[in-house]
Amino acid sequence: MPDVHDKITRSYNMSRIRSTNTKPELLVRKFLHANGFRYKIHDNKLPGKPDIVLPKYKTVILIHGCFWHGHINCKYAKFPNTNSSYWTPKIIHNISKDKQHIKSLKKDGWKIIILWTCKLSPKKINNAFASLIKKIIL
């Protein structure tokens, strides 16, 4: 199935997709700050430049988009039917990079918390934040 947009429109649409300071990221940061946690964002000294770093707790929080990071068994993580020769290797490469970064962080003694954006929906947000605090402190 061919793309429904021309190259210029598709390029513009893709340029609007942010990799940092996304809505889920800002939501989590606002919650953490309101609950007294202090953090660094996008620390480039650590492998993979984690979204949120809590140095006091030696914890990193990775906020993963279900599509971009290949969330298993998630309705938002389906491979597209169009241009699959591009998307499938790209997402598989993202997954392997994530695994490498997590392995490096664990090797250095960091605790890793992965938050999937599907778990940050308005209906599920309270449970996600309650478990987040438990994971950070324990």
Image: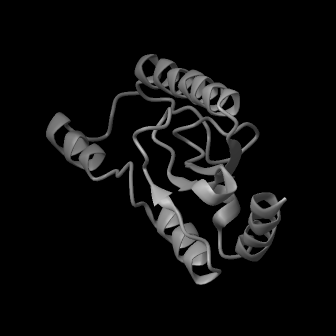
In-image side of 22 versus 76 (left or right): left
Q: Position of residue 47 (x, y in %)?
A: 50, 32
Query: Which image quadrant for residue 5?
Result: top left
In-image side of 84 versus 107 (left or right): left
In-image side of 116 versus 133 (left or right): left
| Residue extending farthest left | 8
Relative depth, front residue between 66 and 45: 45
Q: Residue at 85% of width from left, 59% of height from top?
A: 138
Q: Position of residue 75 (x, y in %)?
A: 68, 47
Query: Which image quadrant for residue 7?
Result: top left
Q: Residue at 75% of width from left, 60% of height from top?
A: 136
Q: Position of residue 126 (x, y in %)?
A: 75, 76
Q: Position of residue 78 (x, y in %)?
A: 61, 37
Query: Which image quadrant for residue 120?
Result: bottom right
Q: Is residue 87 visible in this depiction of the protein?
A: yes
Please tell me whether residue 100 is drawn above or below residue 72 in the rendered image.
above
Please tell me whether residue 34 is drawn above or below residue 64 in the rendered image.
below
Q: Is residue 117 visible in this depiction of the protein?
A: no
| Residue extending farthest front | 56
Please tell me whether residue 31 is drawn above or below residue 89 in the rendered image.
below
Q: Residue at 51% of width from left, 45% of height from top?
A: 50
Relative depth, front residue between 74 and 47: 47
Q: Quadrant of the N terminus?
A: top left
Q: How many marks?
A: 0
